[in-house]
Amino acid sequence: MNFDSDSKFKKKNLTHGVKGIMPGDVLLIRTIKDNPFMALIGWLIRKITRGWTTHAAIYLGGGGNYIVEALLDGVKKTKLKKYLNNKTQFLVYRNRRLNTFKLTILKDFLYSAIGKPYDLDGIKDFIFDDRKNDANKFFCSELEVIGYQLIGIKSSNKPARKSSPADLRRFYDSPKGKKEGWILWDTFNIEV
């Protein structure tokens, strides 16, 4: 599978459809923006993390097909449709060990995180670690790792504060990740 191309996409729909995405699924997102500043940010994230993806979100479901994501203006509940366009690629990962009880705990954590500030200091720590940690702030992959840790499912080989979206993908696709129950469930705007 080659996910490193910025070329035109042939696949426009999810194989399983939006209804095929289940609550608790993780979306690893790469947005190719028209905005030069955001394009630069995406390029920097990929360079620093040596990975394909630049963002992570967890699917909540519901009537509006909601996701929870940590953005620069804080942790938000937003509609998945904002990523269903020709400027976005994403991978959908599912954990086979996620059951109803664990999903309830995960959702409770995600709802409690909504409105919390973005962990900008945590992002800076990928370059210069100042050893500060604020448990009430999150960046995107940190939110995912902590949420899954709460329910006893490993999603990175690194601590939450040191886990980038690229680290999540590397873990999910690894033998350890597969043993932990992670599978690539679907893709959007990517030919596999």
Image (cartoon, rainbow, N blue to C red):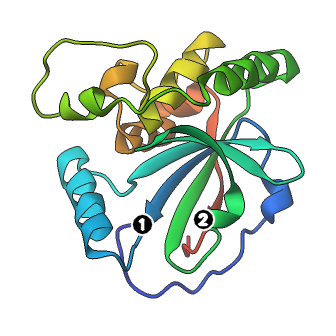
Q: Earlier in the sequence, mark 2 or mark 1?
A: 1
Query: Which mark, residue 3?
Result: 1
Look at 50% across and 56% down and name the residue there.
Answer: 29
Against 182, is 101 above or below? above
* Residue placed under numbered mark 2 in the picture: 83
**Left or right position of 139 against 127:** right
Count the numbered circles shown. 2
Look at 18% across and 47% down and name the residue there.
Answer: 48
Quote the CA–CA distance across marks 2 and 1.
Answer: 17 Å
Query: Which mark, residue 77?
Result: none
Q: Amino acid at mark 1?
A: Phe
Q: Nearer the viewer, residue 112 or 18?
A: 112
Q: Position of residue 79 (x, y in %)?
A: 71, 55
Q: Position of residue 44 (x, y in %)?
A: 20, 56
Crowding at mark 2 (Cα within 10 Å: few <14, some 14-19, many 20+): some
Q: Amino acid at mark 2?
A: Tyr
Against 20, is 36 above or below? below
Q: Position of residue 60 (x, y in %)?
A: 75, 40
Q: Nearer the viewer, residue 101 or 124?
A: 124
Q: Nearer the viewer, residue 112 or 129?
A: 112
The quadrant in which the C terminus is found is bottom right
**Left or right position of 49 against 97:** left
Q: Name the quadrant containing residue 115.
A: top right
**Left or right position of 12 against 99:** left
The kind of secondary structure element at disc 2 is helix
Look at 30% across and 25% down and name the residue there.
Answer: 162
**Left or right position of 38 against 79:** left
The kind of secondary structure element at disc 1 is loop
Q: Are marks 2 and 1 in contact (CB under 8 Å)?
A: no
Q: Nearer the viewer, residue 49 or 171?
A: 49
